[in-house]
Amino acid sequence: MIIYALYLAALFLLLKDGIPWAGAVTSGSIKTRGARREVVRRAEDPDRFKRLVAQRFKGMAPGALCLAAAIGVTLWTTFGAIMAAA
């Protein structure tokens, strides 16, 4: 059951920053984090936009690591079950 939690955590951590990142890349505007959220547009402030998009992309790293761990555990368990049956 813990593997399901790991997959769900990975999905949450990936989508938490992945959806805003994909929206920013396609639309050209991104919202800052925090209490006073403001919209930063690529055409108006390209350097700040680039930094914010890079932060969102780096924010997906824990989710990617969780997903890699979940896939690794799944493959390891499957391989172990196959070897035990043989």
Image (cartoon, helix red, strand yellow):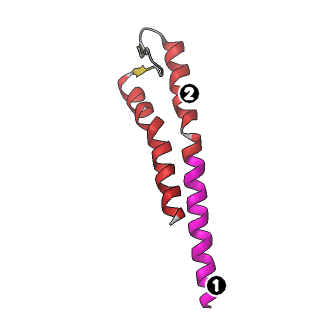
In magenta stretch: residue 52: no
Cα–Cα span, label 2 and label 1: 43 Å
Q: Residue furthest top?
A: 44
Question: Which one is nearer the viewer's eye here, 84 or 41?
Answer: 84
60 vs 45, nearest the viewer? 60
Q: Is residue 5 above or below residue 12?
A: below
Query: Image point 50% across, 26% down: which residue?
Result: 53
The residue that disc 1 covers is 83
Dot 2: within a 10 Å radius of its alpha carbon, few (fewer than 14), some, or many (20 or more) residues? few
Q: Which residues are magenta?
A: 64-86
Looking at the picture, does residue 81 appear above or below residue 73? Answer: below
Going from the N terminus, do you reach mark 2 or mark 1 first? Answer: 2
Query: Can you tell which mark lies on residue 72?
Result: none
**In the shown orientation, is residue 23 left or right of residue 67?**
left
> What residue lies at 56% left-to-right and 61% top-to-bottom?
71
- Callout 1 amino acid: Met
Q: Amino acid at mark 2?
A: Gln
Classify residue 75 as left or right of residue 23: right
SS of the residue under disc 1: helix
> Is 76 covered by the magenta stretch?
yes
Dot 2: element: helix
Where residue 48 appears, as percent x and y from the top left, is 52, 14
Along the viewing direction, whichever of 54 and 6 lies nearer the viewer: 6
